[in-house]
Image: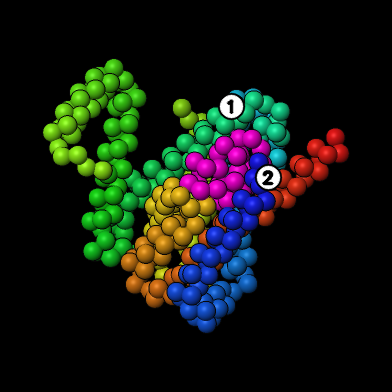
Amino acid sequence: MISRRQAAIGVVFWLLIFGGFVALAGVGDFIETASQISPSRFAVMLGANGLGVLAMGLALYVIAHNVGLGFSAIESVFLNTTVGLAHNLTPFGQAGGIPVSGAILSRQTDRPYEECLAVLSAKDIVGFVPAILVFVVGGGYLALFGRSVPGRLRPLVAAFSLFVVIVVSVAALIYRYPEPAYRVLSRLVAWINRTVARLPLIPSLDPTEVQTTTTAVGSQGILLWLTLGGVGVELSPVLTVFIIPVSLLASGLPLPGGSGGVESLQVLLVVAASGAAASTVITAVLVSRGLVYWTPIIMGSITLFVIEVRDRLA
């Protein structure tokens, strides 16, 4: 489980990162820009964020149901917020949060810890599928037809999409032909070992699972697009959805929930694509990321509190 000290460190770290970005944008500019978001638009932003939370909860339900873990769809939505809570308060994002989340899920379901860990790992693996689709399909579209992408950035988008295609193709070939792949990899490793020795010493997926995780990625992209539009930054929805999985690559950094790394990538990509002022983009990114970050912390904390009270009453 997550200790109070660990939770406090994660929240304080995020607040320090948040404060650093606000200082970079300028406190006055941040407040002025954030106040441009109308109440009606903010309500729609909350709806997009809620859709993402619902979609990821249903993804957990579908995967858990397939392996016989017994809890309802509504329970899965709230349980998944505890997963998000663990991810946001532990280093290395999913890698640090999954063991804690597995313990929480095992406690709630009275099922073996290893089984719960496998379910959560499967959910994260399924979560890569929409990211790959966005990288390949969305990246190809943006590189060839996306008028919102500056000409200087199109070769980079195309190169990134091509790189993803190569990696996925190699992975598919290894899965489809394991024995020839093993022979090739063995020869490759042997060649690398011989080469290094000469150098100087130097330091199966359910369609419903894919649909729900794709909805979650899309909702985060729409949330960012709505926030940018609210502060006057024009960017196409396709491009903002493409930016989300690219920026989430930074969640693998040794930072609670990827705090700082994800925001920095989003700011850099949006500024490069739109040419908008950095202070304006920083404000929009902090507002949208704040919603994504704090929703599982609040809902997950409430869920853990309810579980604790229920166990004590029992």
The chief SS type of the magenta part is helix
Q: Position of residue 184 (x, y in %)?
A: 22, 23
Label placed on residue 206? none
Q: Position of residue 272 (x, y in %)?
A: 33, 66
Q: Amino acid at mark 2?
A: Phe
Q: Residue at x 86, y 39 (%)?
A: 313
Label placed on residue 78? 2
Q: Position of residue 195 (x, y in %)?
A: 15, 32
Q: Residue at x 13, y 33 (%)?
A: 198
- The answer to whether residue 2 of the structure is visible from this angle is yes
* Magenta segment boundaries in residue numbering: 79-104
Question: Is residue 162 magenta-colored?
Answer: no
> Looking at the figure, which quarter contains the C terminus?
top right
**Which type of secondary structure does the marked residue at label 2 adopt?**
helix
Classify 247 as above or below 114: below
Classify 69 as above or below 14: above
Q: Amino acid at mark 1?
A: Glu
Question: Is residue 103 magenta-colored?
Answer: yes
Classify 161 as above or below 280: above
Residue projecting furthest to the top: 179
Closer-to-camera residue (28/191): 191
**Which type of secondary structure does the marked residue at label 1 adopt?**
helix
Closer-to-camera residue (125/186): 186
Classify 254 as above or below 270: above
> Looking at the figure, which quarter contains the N terminus?
top right
Label placed on residue 114? 1
Q: Residue at x 60, y 43 (%)?
A: 83
Q: Name the quadrant containing residue 42.
A: bottom right
- The answer to whether residue 60 of the structure is visible from this angle is no
Q: Position of residue 173 (x, y in %)?
A: 29, 27
Q: Residue at x 52, y 34 (%)?
A: 121
